[in-house]
Amino acid sequence: MMPYGNGMRHSAPDELRSTGDCYLTEGWVVAHWLRQTIYRPPPDLLIWDPAACGVNGWAIGRALGLHWGRPYLLGDIRPMGPGVAQSTYPAPRPEHRGPVLTATNPPFKNLSQWIDNWRATAQHGDALLFVGDSGALTTAEPRSYGIVERVQPCKRCAFGLTTEDADRFRALVEAGEKAPAPAAKHRTGPTGEGMASTGKPHCIALWVAPAVWASGHREVCEEVTPGDLRSGLDLMAWCRESVEG
């Protein structure tokens, strides 16, 4: 991830934020997309997650690779888990003779740059999938042109904190300071720590190469089902077990 994660804010003031912290996409977000997407992975696909983080083994790229039975590569400028390589930003397209699906939760403040960089290097059959700020990815904005599919969950995403943030908050409490508290009724995230809702709607956006312009895009907005939540937890457990075993 880029410093300060993906640009989202939780209730901690800047002076209490640890450098390099990041936010983990909940597993149900990936499961929700998998249930509805029209994308079908080709046999020779390589999945590339350049902002994988890797806390507790969790990464969107790993989840998709395990689910589809396709090879995957994980990178991050600040790796936080096994199997995540040190990478640069912007991360170059991996050397691969077949199509590459770049799938990740990128820094939100760099959305335009991520899209532009991908377009500049994408080869025929490549695709780009990431979790993004829905408001920043409307079809009225030039940077969003070419979206093939946008899946908008009818449930707010509240990204889980990393263990580094959680440890920092606990240390504040032990020192007598008041640390940020999770929002009421918000369940804990993938690291076991709660986090207040961002209040922002998020979507899962898909691009393909060659470009398909705005007139061809597909919008899906459906309720998140209990099955999505269960499948998301299964995906996260599968990722964790794959690095622990």
Image: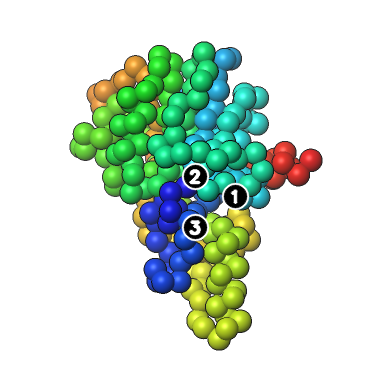
At x 52%, y 35%, the residue is 49
Which comes sooner in the sequence, label 1 or label 3? 3
Does residue 173 appear anywhere in the picture?
yes
Q: Could you say whether the residue bearing mark 2 is in a helix, strand or loop? A: loop
Q: Name the residue under label 3.
A: 21
How busy is the neighbourhood of tag 3: few (under 14 within 10 Å), some, or many (20 plus)?
many
Q: Name the residue under label 2.
A: 77
The residue type indicated by label 3 comes to: Asp
Instruction: Report the front residue among 225 and 206.
Output: 206
The residue type indicated by label 2 comes to: Ile
Q: Mark 1 points at which residue?
A: 80
Q: Are marks 1 and 2 in contact (CB under 8 Å)?
A: no
Query: Left or right: where does residue 52 sit relative to residue 93?
Result: right
Instruction: Report the front residue among 28 and 59.
Output: 59
Q: How far apart are marks 1 and 2 (CA)?
A: 10 Å
At x 47%, y 60%, the residue is 19
At x 33%, y 41%, the residue is 111
How busy is the neighbourhood of tag 2: few (under 14 within 10 Å), some, or many (20 plus)?
many
Residue 162, by quadrant, is: bottom right
Residue 93: x and y, percent? Answer: 45, 26
